Amino acid sequence: MILTFFLFYFIVNKVGVVDYGIYLFVMAITGYFGILNLGIGNSLIKFVAQYHTEDDKKKLNEVINTTFFIFLFIGIIGAVLLFLIGTFLLSYLADTFSALEAPNFYNKARAIIYFLAANFIFGLAFSTLRGIIAGIQRYDILAFIAFVMSLINLSVVLIVLSLGGGIVDLVFYQICTGLINFIIIAFYIQKKLPFVKIKFSFVNRSMIKVLMDLSMSVFLLSVFITIIYYTDRLVIGLLVDVALITFYVAAWKLYGLPAQVPAIALQAIIPAASELESKDNLPGLRRLFLRGTKYVLGLCFALAVPLFILSREILVWWMGSDYAPYFIVVQILIISLFFDFNNYVANQILTGMNKIKKFVKYYGIVAVMNLCLSIYFVQLGWGLTGVALGTTIPFILLEVFFLRYVFSVLDIKWGTYLKKVVARTLPFALAVGILLYGILLIRVPEVETVRWHIGLTDVGAYFAVGFTIYLLLFYYLGLEEYERKEIKYIISRIIAKAKSIFGGTA
């Protein structure tokens, strides 16, 4: 995540805001093809976890191979559709929407889509391999592979762009690099699960029904989430200016930091919830939701509050003064997180329990409202601010309905949630926000007009102060004594393992 954050500035400055806007516009179109996963990926993780726990090698091979060949078939269909989009739809869009009148828009966009089409044939099928590792809950392996791949990707970006390559060249080489990821994962699977083989004879028709029973709800959920997170870019590209997508995504990346950090660990909840549900352990699921959501809110608020207050300064330090006016987009999007944070753990738990049908309806309404409001606000002339409002308003209005459903499934009372989660996270966020803004007013009285002139050292110091104070308040006032003891124990284990790895004394 850190590498991606800093690479964004490097890539944009090398290829230009227009070419990167073209790339983001194409990725917004192809992002919809992620729904062709049909939700089967999460079903795979759930059932791999279940069959691995039961040590049922036969069903493990069946669910893995059934998923692999379904994805291979879908990948071929998706590649054909992408080829048709690159050949016909892009030409129509370029001729119809004046916002797409960028130099060589059609040629560059078409080349990128063709590369992505070729990659899609096997990319979806190979994602099965990652699902296997996730299903057996070896996230240490996935973390190591992700670390290696981030360094490889960094090298590719620096080499390609330093040698004068453009955005099209970069996409091609990054796709080639992605194949290394699957090779490494396949190696680990063969080492940890030597009995797993990819053979068409292992495909089981009845397993398709087992997978689809859960996956259709997950599929619909993916459709709605895709609309929420990709349609904004299409609206900007078609109705405003394709180059402005780059400015919006810069703001989006800042907003995404506090959202993505806890999400790194949340993927482990699906197999854990599946295991608890299979043992009919409702109290365990309840504790998982309450503690997990409290931890997510705590970590997210620690990052989101300083980002909210310092959004303009960080944007300017990171991307340049041209991005200063778009700090309001960051702030509007961060406001949505104060509501959406509540959903993170619940989403994973309900998926593991196969009880997300009403949850899907909630996101469906959010998606429709998001699209309609974004278009409406853009037509009013509100530009990127209007698009951000279209994303945030639905989350604010509908959050209470989502929580009501979660509480009914897990048998949680509103008072319990307010006492154990909200009261132990939100007050600290408000206090730190007021304190941080007060410090800015004292240090820089002309805060509303010259804030972006604050130096990098001050920005970093203010952020560190807000982040640290929040974590201290959360740790000592938000956590129970037994939770603090658990955290201390985990940290001691990490330190001991680090010492053993690097030659120290464990």
Image: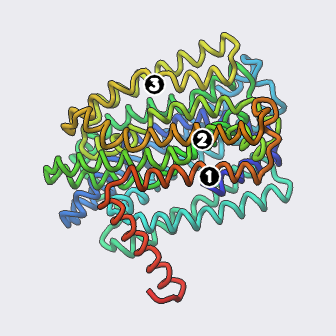
Kindly identify which residue carries mark 3. 396
| Extreme residue toward the top, this view | 380
Q: Position of residue 94 (x, y in %)?
A: 74, 23
Horizontal arrangement in the rendering, residue 494 relative to residue 303 (left or right): left
Q: Position of residue 172 (x, y in %)?
A: 69, 52
Q: Say which quadrant the N terminus sits in.
A: bottom right
Kindly identify which residue carries mark 2. 435
Q: Position of residue 472 (x, y in %)?
A: 49, 55
Q: Amino acid at mark 2?
A: Leu
User: SS for tag 2?
Assistant: helix
Residue placed at 67% from the left, 42% from the top?
A: 439
Horizontal arrangement in the rendering, residue 225 relative to residue 201 (left or right): right
User: SS for tag 3?
Assistant: helix
Horizontal arrangement in the rendering, residue 92 relative to residue 18 (left or right): left
Kindly identify which residue carries mark 1. 465
Q: Amino acid at mark 1?
A: Val
Horizontal arrangement in the rendering, residue 240 relative to residue 72 (left or right): right
- Asked whether the viewer can see residue 276, the reply is yes
Which dot marks residue 416?
A: none
